[in-house]
Image: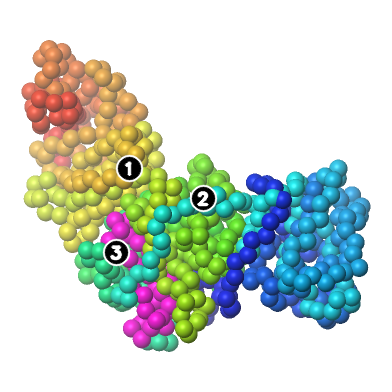
Amino acid sequence: MQNHISTKRLWVGILSFFLFSINGAGQDIQWASDVIFQFNQYGENDYSASQVLGIPDAVPFGEMSPSAFRLNTESGYGTITLGYEVPQPVSQVFIVENFLPGRVSKVILHDTDQKAHTIYESNGKKISESFNILEIKVDKTQYLVQQVAVHLNTYTNTGWSQIDAVGISEEVFSGKVIPGNSTSVATESEEIVFLAKKERLNNNVNTKYLESKPVITPDGRRLYFARKNAPSNMGGKRDEQDIYVSDLVGKEWSFAINVDQPLNDKLPNGICSVSPDGNSIMVINAYYEDGTVENGVSVSRKTTSGWGFPKKQIIEDYLNLSEYQDYFQSNSGKVLISSVERNDSKGDQDLYVSFRTGEDSWSRPVNMGSAINTKKVEFAPFLASDNKTLYFASNGHRGFGESDIYYSRRLDDTWTNWSSPTNIGKAINSASWDGYYTISAKGDYAYFISTAGAMNKVNFNPTDEDIYRISLSKEAKPDPVILVKGKVINSKTNQPIEADIFYESLPIKEEDGLATSDPNDGSYQIVLPAGKKYGFRAEAKGFIAISQNEDFTSVDTYKEITRDLVLTPLKVGETVQLNNIFFVQSKAEMLPESDPELARLLLLLNDNPSLEIELGGHTDNRGSSAANLKLSEERALSVMNYLLDNNIDKKRLDYKGYGGTKPVASNASAESRQKNRRVEIKILKF
């Protein structure tokens, strides 16, 4: 069986961080994408011509690396001819000589007509530095370059000379080439600047064993993570990875405990994401009742006795060619981001998006595009509560070490159009390995994994992983959200109810997200991005939902509110408010924001063919009583006409206007008067 741990490629050795000037700023370098021809390479994988593809990554520069090309012998000739995905004019060529530079003897550009243009020749020269970037400037070519041939001669100066990467650019630059740099040459000013310093979590969380993959709940009060090969794992030290949990008590994290079965077993287990209500959790692997697992992802839901057995998620056309995998489910519960390798991946693991098609089913994964994905590894996705700021780790973009954390913002609803990724900055990213970034809904702290602390240990191990956190500056925070929490209760008994929670932005008809209430105490919690109007409600069998609505269009900072959701038993004589029916001021014309509530009322009647109701219209007490009575009657009639237009039998419907005679709140303020302007349904027969 494969090892299905969401993890990183391990790099053995100490990373160093170097900057190299290259003349200009803010433009793109295109790094080689294909090997067209090679002669005299040392190996078929390590030290081969394929190691020249992509960004400079044979770090630390100045040391021999299997991630760079070298000849089969210390003295000899060699050639690599490289292809580029997009043919382009060229003003500058960059040859990253990561070890024993000065052995490049000739550089030839090949245009789209296969004509050769020699731009550099040398008998070879000995360079005192152990690494170098050979910059070759030419007048901008009038032809499009699609291949570059680099010839090496190590007879003149014997040694294991290495080439790490070959880039081409249309303009002359004065930016920086950095180990781990992507096709974009950027200045340090593009990094996020943090006022605070990262801090290692206490020893209740971090141990001498490896901690990995932290996931903070949106309320910031519970931290899930994985621990490797610890005696407290289900299978002891031989158990490769288990899930643990710690709670924030005051200002300190509690002693982390193993979450136990069924989430953990004697096989490798890992956490992916937790729903805002804390009532469902996504874990790596597809679990089976016989104790076996396979590549995939599962969801466990909270029961009255603890976590339920993880249920395999069915992803259309599922395929992962990598032994590694990562997943993240959005707070809305409707979007799944995968880090897998598929046939259309750009190189290694890419980030993909799927959409919910059923309770445990998802659409075919779609590659999230070239702004995010590179020919290297993209992994550890985390979608912030604003539903558009994506954090992820990669060694294919501009960075400071083996793996860095980046963020990008979704630009439209395709989920394939993203802003150019921004490095989260040196306050978090180190010359070592960094990944698995997670942030609370409030955005006060970010939590992440770093191996930076290993560099300072007496018994150095470059794979030591600990969990750190950092206080977030304004620039590093995602857009503000509102955390809505409360309980689902029976309107007659005030007892808690286990229910499904639905919410939607208004006037859009499509539901934005879903959640569940706790089966023990009825508590729920949802996170809503600011800047919209929302309707939300609870649904349970045998009850009628009373919808709530909130206007968050002017909210510009994180906010928490408490709203209990009431369910009314489906019984004769019961009355339920339709809070999300909206009218033009002083008229009976319904606004588009009413459509979701109307659709739910229609569904209620279709699902219960014996149900007969009265629609009651109500106003506040301002103005003429006769006018109020007439308006309330017309509004109730508008709702009834909608139902009649959608094939509900007229015999099942009645309507009546009550004007301002039955207030549910004081008429002393504008806010309370709004509550009195409403439409209700009364159950006449069931």
| Range covered by the magenta-colored residues | 205-234
Q: Amino acid at mark 1?
A: Thr
In this view of the protein, which residue sits in the foreground, 141 or 82?
Answer: 141
Q: Where in the figure is residue 676, as x and y percent of width and height?
A: 14, 28
Q: Residue at x 29, y 48 (%)?
A: 483
Mark 3 sits on what residue?
222
Q: Is residue 665 left or right of residue 464?
A: left
86 magenta-colored:
no
In this view, 88 is above or below 20: above
What is the C-alpha distance between the residues marked 2 and 1? 20 Å
Whole-angstrom CA distance, mark 3 to mark 2, is 26 Å
Q: Please name which of the two marks, 2 or 1, marks the residue nearer to the observer.
A: 1
- Asked if the residues shown at circle 3 and circle 1 are in contact, with their CB atoms under 8 angstroms apart, the answer is no
Residue visible at 57% across and 48% down? 420
What quarter of the picture does the C terminus occupy? top left
Which residue corresponds to the image point at 23% horizontal and 45% vertical from the top-left? 561
Residue highlighted by disc 1 = 557
Residue under circle 2? 408
Q: Earlier in the sequence, mark 3 or mark 2?
A: 3
Which residue occupies 10% across, 14% down?
Answer: 625
Q: Secondary structure at mark 1?
A: loop
Q: Position of residue 550 (x, y in %)?
A: 27, 37
Q: Residues within 10 Å of mark 2 (few under 14, many from 20)?
A: many
